[in-house]
Image (tube, grey):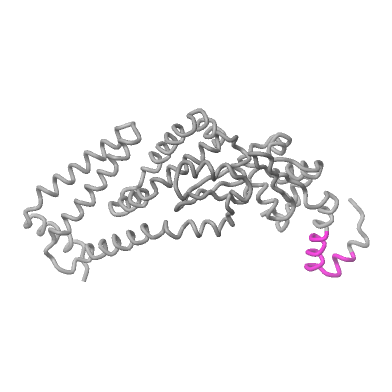
């Protein structure tokens, strides 16, 4: 599973929410309209053996989607991000806030009002 | 009650008393010879044959030992017989239903839904085999029953010649499918680990090399490794 349920606060950037390979693939998908598998392996520099399983996971988790493209004797997948980067950021924020409010209730909400970045 | 020393005594008394000791000795010796042959020989076909021969002699050996037993109610023999019958039933029946389980597990669809040529290629080579595809980016191919399964990842990765080599490889498995459960059963009955899988893969590759081309088999293997 893509680990939205296991957030790692000490990690850098997107790897707080995704594994490093997942994050690299998502970056490619967010910055391109549609990508083929070879394009993704080339842009991320990650071998197919790691990319293929991760793509299956991202599709299953709903972050990426794929369509089948048939041309002549060949078949290939075309990948794209299900939501834009901003929308995904929104989804992640929503989930984190829900979880904070569920756990801490009023204290969490008061903190949002007085929040200043340290 | 069951006592292991009593059972062993039983075996020794019965075997020496039955006059089958020379037969048992010869069978054990031949089994050993064929096992050594299997370990020393390099050629896949000969390796496979000597492995099967060794296992057959092992089964024969077990049969002779059982027939030499005059003692009634030997627990070890009863357990072994039950094990042999049960494992034979499972190994023989499983392939008849297993491909159906696979189709459901992978939500596999007939490949003719997306492209026609792989099924046509199979029809030219074998009667009745059906090609399926399933939704996964991980390159994989396998055969069960009379079905060949290819992942979309495999279709993406291979060019036409390489894909034909992969399909031919799987077809070889299907053609020899009636033998694989037998091999598995032999190794169940003799408690030897079935090492013939490697030989089967090599023979399947050799067949793919004949039907398509050796270079296609080679480059497909390289892409997968």
* Residue B151 location (% of width, % of height): 58, 47
Q: Is residue A99 magenta?
A: yes
* Residue B104 location (% of width, % of height): 55, 59
Q: Hey, which quadrant is residue B11 in on the image?
A: bottom left
Chief secondary structure of the magenta portion = helix
Nearest to the observer: residue B134 or residue A80? B134
The single residue placed furthest to the top in the displayed view is B215
Tell me the residue at 50%/48% (across/down).
B148
Q: Is residue B77 magenta?
A: no
From the viewer's perspective, is B112 left or right of B43? right
Which segment did they paint magenta? A94-110
Tell me the residue at 43%/47% (across/down).
B174
Rendered-image quadrant of the N terminus of chain B:
bottom left
Tell me the residue at 23%/52% (across/down).
B59
Rendered-image quadrant of the C terminus of chain B:
top right
Asked if residue A73 is positioned above or below residue A110 in the image, the reply reads above
């Amino acid at each position: 599973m893509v680990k939205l349920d296991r957030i790692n606060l000490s990690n850098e950037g997107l790897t707080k929410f995704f594994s490093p390979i997942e994050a690299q693939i998502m970056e490619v998908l967010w910055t391109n309209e549609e990508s083929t598998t070879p394009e993704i392996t080339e842009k991320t520099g990650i071998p197919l053996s790691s990319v293929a399983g991760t793509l299956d996971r991202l599709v299953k988790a709903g972050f990426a989607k794929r369509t089948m493209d048939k041309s002549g004797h060949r078949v290939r997948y075309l990948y794209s991000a299900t939501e834009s980067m901003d929308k995904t950021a929104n989804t992640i924020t929503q989930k984190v806030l829900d979880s904070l409010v569920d756990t801490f209730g009023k204290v969490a909400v008061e903190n949002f009002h007085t929040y200043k970045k340290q | 009650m069951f006592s292991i020393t009593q059972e062993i005594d039983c075996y020794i008394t019965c075997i020496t008393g039955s006059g089958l000791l020379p037969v048992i000795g010869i069978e054990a010796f031949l089994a050993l010879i064929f096992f050594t042959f299997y370990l020393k020989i390099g050629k896949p076909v000969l390796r496979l044959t000597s492995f099967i021969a060794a296992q057959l002699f092992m089964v024969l050996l077990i049969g002779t030992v059982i027939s030499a037993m005059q003692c009634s109610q030997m627990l070890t023999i009863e357990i072994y017989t039950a094990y042999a019958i049960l494992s034979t039933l499972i190994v023989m029946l499983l392939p008849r239903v297993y491909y159906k389980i696979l189709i459901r597990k992978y939500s596999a669809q007939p490949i003719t839904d997306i492209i026609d040529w792989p099924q046509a290629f199979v029809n030219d080579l074998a009667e009745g085999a059906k090609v399926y595809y399933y939704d996964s980016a991980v390159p994989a191919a396998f055969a069960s029953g009379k079905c060949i399964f290819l992942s979309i990842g495999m279709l993406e990765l291979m060019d036409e010649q390489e894909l034909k080599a992969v399909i031919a490889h799987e077809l070889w498995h299907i053609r020899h499918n009636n033998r694989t459960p037998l091999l598995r059963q032999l190794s169940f009955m003799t408690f030897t680990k079935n090492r013939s899988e490697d030989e089967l893969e090599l023979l399947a590759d050799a067949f793919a090399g004949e039907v398509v081309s050796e270079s296609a088999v080679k480059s497909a293997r390289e892409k997968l490794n």
